[in-house]
Amino acid sequence: MINSSFLCGGTGWDRDGAFLRLSDPAGQPAALRLGHGAELRFRIRSEAPRYCLGYELVHEEGRKPRACPDQAAAERGYQCRRCFFADEGRLVHNSHRGGDLPAGLRSFLARPQWLYIATFADGTTKVGTAADQRKTLRLTEQGALAAQYVARAANGLQVRILEDAVSSGLGLPQAVRSGHKCASLAAALPDTVLESINAGHADDARTLLLDREQQGFDVVKEAWTRPEAFDVVLQNPGAGLYPLPLGAGEHGLVLRGMLGSTALAATDDVGLSFLADLTALKGQRLELGAYSSALPALQEPLF
């Protein structure tokens, strides 16, 4: 990477593994792979707590990101006011509740979608949706430890109606904070327990869906296969939470593994590994360079 300053768009996954989404000062996209041994060394000294990540235009083939033309501070979530109102991607979540939709978004939503039940390290369980073409990677990015698909809907409108029905009928949330997922990995429940929790919620969801008269979907029973890459993180149960706030100051992390947006990382202090929620970098300007983490005094019981 030629420039050392980048705006961070958070973590992502593809078939090659995890990466950090970046864009240079001109808005050109870049990526930093987060494979084993990769070094993430940066400084954050922003004038604003968070910067705008731009907006999305949605077409039949998928979402097309656009950089914020003003490189402005974020006002709503990860967007400035201008990009918030230009963003077609945000309309996806409420598309089933009525209102006019752009033609490209209607075409995008016409594709098949999946409804899933995902369980995280402490047993917290959510209901969610995944586009047909991102059926597997969606759950990988979410950091699920056990998951099942419970329905395949004809389109994005139908699947979101089902999501609302399962959420309200079973009391399952539609979102789980990334910080909660990261913290729960410090004391993950055994796989057998998580699979049992997930199977119970998934069966309840299928029962609820079978009683619906709504057309345009099929109830399915299909398990998601957790990627082997997660094992590196799960096989280090002694790792504590990274003790510094990632959104400010200087940091030097050496990646050992990734699970969703959580990194298992070492610092320059020999023998210490931590769990770090890299979602904290989203919307921040990172100055990449030869930086390191100045760790506070840590109590031995934390390890």
Image (cartoon, grey):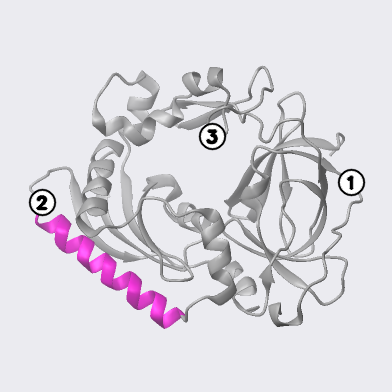
Image position of 56 with respect to 281: above or below: above
Left or right position of 99 against 14: left
In the image, what residue type sits under mark 1? Gly
Q: CA distance from mark 3 to mark 2?
A: 35 Å
Name the residue tied to disc 2: 212
Q: Position of residue 274 (x, y in %)?
A: 71, 68
Is disc 1 surrounded by few (<14), some (14 to 19) or many (20+) residues within 10 Å? Answer: some
Earlier sequence position, callout 1 versus callout 2: 2
The disc labelled 3 sits on which kind of residue?
Answer: Gly
Instruction: State the separation of the CA atoms marked 1 and 2.
Output: 56 Å
Of pointers 3 and 1, the one earlier in the residue sequence: 3
Marks 3 & 1, CB-CB < 8 Å contact: no
Residue at x 86% of width, y 60% of height: 294
Question: Secondary structure beneath disc 2?
Answer: loop
Q: Nearer the viewer, mark 3 or mark 1?
A: 3
Provide the residue span drawn in magenta.
191-211
Q: Which residue is mark 3?
A: 77
Q: Is residue 205 magenta?
A: yes
Q: CA distance from mark 3 to mark 1?
A: 28 Å
The part of the image, by quadrant, that contains residue 183 is: bottom right
Instruction: Name the outermost residue toward the right.
Output: 290
Which is more N-terminal, label 2 or label 3? 3
- The numbered mark at residue 289 is 1
Q: Which of the 4 image quarters holds residue 257?
A: bottom right
Residue 104 appears in which quarter of the rendering? top left
Q: Per the image, is 292 magenta?
A: no
Give SS at disc 3: loop
